[in-house]
Image (spheres, rainbow, N blue to C red):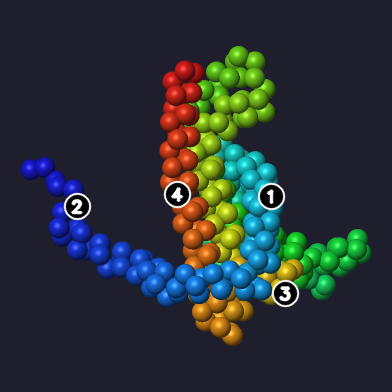
Amino acid sequence: MRYRRGGRAGVVAALPMLAVVTVPLVALASASSPAEIAAGVRHPLFLPALWLSARTTVASLAVIVVAGTPLAWWLARSSGRGVRVAELLVDLPVVIPPAVMGIALLQTFGPNGLLGPALASLGVRLPFTAAAVVVAQVAVSAPFYVQGAAAAFRRLDEDLLIVARTLGQSPAGAFFRIAVPLALPGMVTGAALSWARALGEFGATLFFAGNFTGSTQTMPLAIYTALESDTRVAVALALVLAAASVLLLVPLRTVPTLLSRRANARRRRA
């Protein structure tokens, strides 16, 4: 007897969790009128927070991709106890509460922290600056890119890399001309998830960078500040941030598929 996919019982069983995920978003979408959303966009908190979130998340994503790609390659192509320990360390920020990560960053880069005095001797002050926002975002969102890129590198056909080397490619040439193009869909997905996590970062940023309008106040912190005085403004800001997440979700679903098709075509030609 052939097993039927889904079925009415499967739909009924899936409804509770689907409701938990979607009903709050529907409630948020229906909580404000277009006029209230427009008022939220015109609020003094909005544009500085939006601009700060935009530039800090782009900067943090650039740092994550540049520094995380070699780490992902090493994790994917190596084995042993050291690699397992490194994978555990990479995954830690996913399970550690963001507030704890913020305190840890303070204990690392604060005036009395592990590296604080050395940085102070160089004239560098990191906590409660825009650079601290970037550091907090990198710390909490890097695992999403590293995990995605490492998984993509693990799926590579080893024979293609061997052929590239036999045809005269250096290790770096085989990496950039073969490995990266073929693993690009997974890398893009990981980068998008990492960017989304950085965009929504709250706890580590609040503890390590503070909540100063125009300098360290990102969109989530602006929502928190607005909630203390005007719920309607907070809802409007939340809707804008949710809309940005939805706009991110569409390319997150489509771009990796297109890249996968191109990678498969390239693989067949190879």
Q: Residue at x 15, y 58 (%)?
A: 8
Q: Earlier in the sequence, mark 2 or mark 3?
A: 2
Distance in Å between CA atoms under marks 1 and 3: 23 Å
Instruction: Give the amino acid at mark 4.
Output: Val
Q: Which residue is mark 2?
A: 6
Residue extending furthest toward the front:
35
Question: In the structure shown, which secondary structural element does the residue marked by tag 1 occupy?
Answer: helix
| Res. 250 mark | 4
Where does label 3 land, which residue? Answer: 212
Above or below, comparing residue 243 to residue 97 in the picture: above
- Which numbered disc, 1 or 3, marks the residue that appears first in the sequence? 1
- The disc, 1 or 4, on the residue closer to the chain's N-terminal end is 1
Mark 1 lies on residue = 63
Residue 111 shown left or right of residue 269 in the figure: right
Mark 2 vs mark 3, CA separation in Å: 50 Å
Q: Nearer the viewer, mark 2 or mark 3?
A: 3
**Which element carries disc 3, helix, strand or loop?**
loop
The quadrant in which residue 201 appears is bottom right
